[in-house]
Image: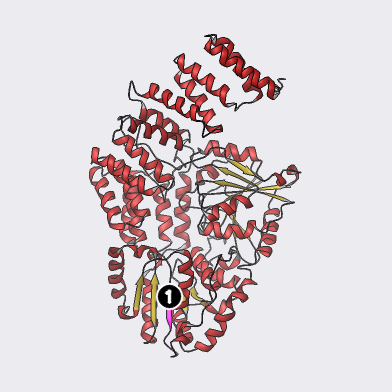
Amino acid sequence: MAHPVRLSDHDINTRTHAAVAAYHAADKATAKRLCDDILAAMPTHPYALNLVAVMAMEAAHLEQALDVFDRLIDAHPDDAQGLSNRRICIERMCQPNNQWLRLGFHYYQTGRVRKAIDVYRQAIAKGAANDNIHGNLGAHLQDLGDWDEAERQYQLALALNPAHTGTLYNLGHLLSLQHKHSQAEAALRQAIALKPDYADAHLSLGHLLAQAGELDAAMRCFDVADALTPKSPLPPTAKLFNLAYDPSTTAREMYALAVRAASHMGAAAVDSRLRGNDIKSGHDAKNGDDAKSGNVTKSGDDTHREEEQSSADKKIKIGFVSGDFKDHPVGYFLENLLRHVNRERFEWHVFSNYESSDAVASRLRTLASRWTDIAGQSDVAARALITQAGIDILFDLSGHTALHRLPLFASRSPSSSVPVQITWLGWHDTTGLANMDYLLTDRASMPPARQANGSPYVTEQPLYLPRTRLCMMPPQNAPAISAQPMLRKGLEGCITFGSMQIVAKLSSISLQLWARILREVPSARLIIRTKQFREIAVMERFKIKCETHGLPMTRVDLLPPLGRGDYLASYEHIDILLDSYPYPGGTTTAEALWMGVPTITMGGNTMISRQGVSLLTAAGLQGWIATSQDDYVAKAVYWASHATELQTLRSGLREQVAKTALFDGVQFARDFEAAVSSVIPA
């Protein structure tokens, strides 16, 4: 059995000087042997790595040299000599036969996106850029969140090749993220005009239209993509995700689509570095049209707390997989769990499918026992990391939403080291996977619809939490609760209703109900604030839709989104939130309660449609849950004439809900731990 080489600092320094001397004396064999001794004792020694790489480069072993330079820069990112020599090596590799694109694509495929960016930037500096290099650079910069520079690179690529469908697609996707709806739609439609069988472009256009409230047009796009790629899980996933906005959707339909999507999630069905509801197409190393561009990764970046390492074999290891460990509802709800968990009995592992450094991600990193980035990793590689961690229970926190890794869960074999798989939090409906063991839920969330055998429309076994499936982290730096707006106006009945949901949630039924309320309360106003109203064209189309459904637009304010602090403060202008149907609010409902604003909600026949019911039940506000459309309107009309009673509720609502299951992280952690402990195989 080999043992590590032990050298003192003095021995290492002596060998380093001797290796350099041997190199300058042209005795490269001795120099290499001395460097190998040093690296056996200290694998990241910068001088030894640099010298080994330089000698390989001089011997024309350029790929070997680059591999060693990469090891050097990974360990010492600011090593000036290593960086300079690495650039020389790359130039020697790529310049003679214009191999820049090939090397950059190699780095991307192996999950080293930042190194791919370095290669493309060097190619541009050397005057070797083409449309594919600019396009790939834009795709990777977009993954890293540098949207302005990504857009500039896309435009440079299109200036060289206006008909590059991959670039048009990526540009359309980027513009949609920036809520530039009209420009995004134009780019995607141009890509489709050039390549009518471009399934990904049809999918992306469908998502764009759905988010603008054009659900019928979106479904037509998904149907086209489905016909083009009948074995792909992406079109049925897209339909499933967006059917949740349709009031006519049944639990049975959601179940059937989920099962169909899951049936295509075999190892060869989809590269799960690319997600169905947030996918981008990139540039192939040969012709630039067919390759995929995924998410940035820091492969194997394991951040862990030393205090968790003792007696690790005695602890239950819980793993969470998602791309939403960031400023996102998944992050908000998970944080309140991780702040109160038992660290003596459990280890809490995060497997992140997206690189984020925002405030929420930073807090979650400190709360996790171990953090592993799997963005850009294949399912096989990610599964190996999970196996290596010894996970006992693996949670999917995304379902069929963007950045999910469901194929990773689908790939579990009977001999897998992960005995239990559970879905929770990011998507509250069935995944459709045969080997997803449990769906973590609460009884208020489950619709009454049943299959012929009496079981709910889920492939998983429901695992019920006793109080709530969602426990919200109280908003940080929330302003004080303001006085009741209706009373400030001095006239009871001058109530202001509000909605803070995305346009896709504002269905025809929602608008019809709100129109009825405004008719029955002639002095009432309605504020609709949503991020889609950043763009005037979307707002104008929605205004027409409102008018079609009978809303008096002289009493309706359509407003653009606000920053986090201003958004919370804006509740001072709202008396009551009117929930959307059939896709209700989640985080918005909880945040509004914290700001003293109750929500009128109504449950439906799918799990997601009962989210508002679950939240208000957990908050002890069952009286705000409507049992029918007439009851929904009646509750709104009642409160419009009970301003003083509403003010009493408002002034004490934060203190009231803070003690309930919706915000009680300590009790939720105990409930959660009991539930997961109950399903661990004996």
> Residue drawn 61% across and 26% down?
43
Image quadrant in which the N terminus is located: top right
495 falls in the magenta region: yes
Amino acid type at circle 1 is: Gly
Residue 446 at x, y = what percent? 55, 65
Position of 91 relative to 559 (above/below)? above
Residue 522 at x, y = what percent? 36, 87
Residue 678 left/right relative to 603:
right
Residue 413 left/right relative to 490:
right
Q: Is residue 422 visible in this depiction of the protein? A: no
Which residue matches tag 1?
498
Question: Which portion, as a residue range, is magenta?
Answer: 493-499
> Residue drawn 70% across and 44% down?
306
Closer-to-camera residue (552/436): 552
355 falls in the magenta region: no
* Quadrant in the picture for residue 154: top left
Q: Is residue 480 visible in this depiction of the protein? A: yes
Position of 424 relative to 25 (above/below)? below
Residue 593 at x, y = what percent? 54, 73
Q: Secondary structure at mark 1?
A: strand
